[in-house]
Amino acid sequence: MADLQTLFDDANGHLALGEIDEAILLYRRCVELDPGFFDGWHALGMALLKTGSIKEAIGCGLQSVTLEPNDLLAWTSLSQMYVRDGNIPEAEAAKGNARILSLGGKIVR
């Protein structure tokens, strides 16, 4: 069985080549192997967003901010996902958390 980092690197390679479906399959394997793998959840969510699988992308985004609540990029990405879904109140809330972090604050201490 391939190790997690190798799978993740391979997925990133597919993504770089525009092979999004292949990347998604490998990102899914990453988070199956390690459900606590923040980078895997974040990348999976962004790849799903590119394919228009917005609801599933939001689920991955929520998992990302649950695992790393003080990650600025995770909150920014989640906000983008909610905008694509047309859920402006949730998008604004996520953007607000990103703003707090960008100013040096913390969501969870």
Image (cartoon, rainbow, N blue to C red):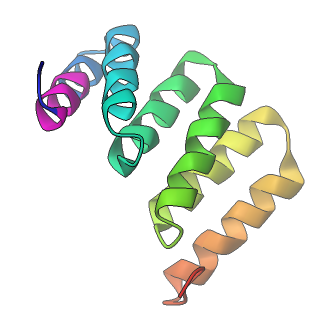
The x, y position of residue 38, in whole percent, is 39, 50
Residue 93 is drawn in which quadrant? bottom right
Q: Give yes or no for residue 54 being in the magenta stretch.
A: no
In the image, residue 82 above or below residue 21 = below
Span of residues in magenta: 4-11
Q: Decide whether the magenta segment is chiefly helix, strand or loop.
A: helix
Q: Quadrant of the N terminus?
A: top left
Q: Give yes or no for residue 8 being in the magenta stretch.
A: yes
In the image, residue 29 above or below residue 67 = above
The x, y position of residue 78, in whole percent, is 62, 50
Question: Is residue 3 left or right of 63 when viewed as pictured?
Answer: left
Question: Is residue 95 left or right of 89 when viewed as pictured?
Answer: left
Residue at x-position 53% and y-position 88%? 109
Between 18 and 90, the one lying in front of the other is 90
Residue at x-position 53% and y-position 24%? 48
The x, y position of residue 43, in whole percent, is 40, 37
Disc tally is: 0
The x, y position of residue 41, in whole percent, is 44, 40
Residue 6 is drawn in which quadrant? top left
In the image, residue 90 above or below residue 21 = below
Residue at x-position 24% and y-position 17%? 14
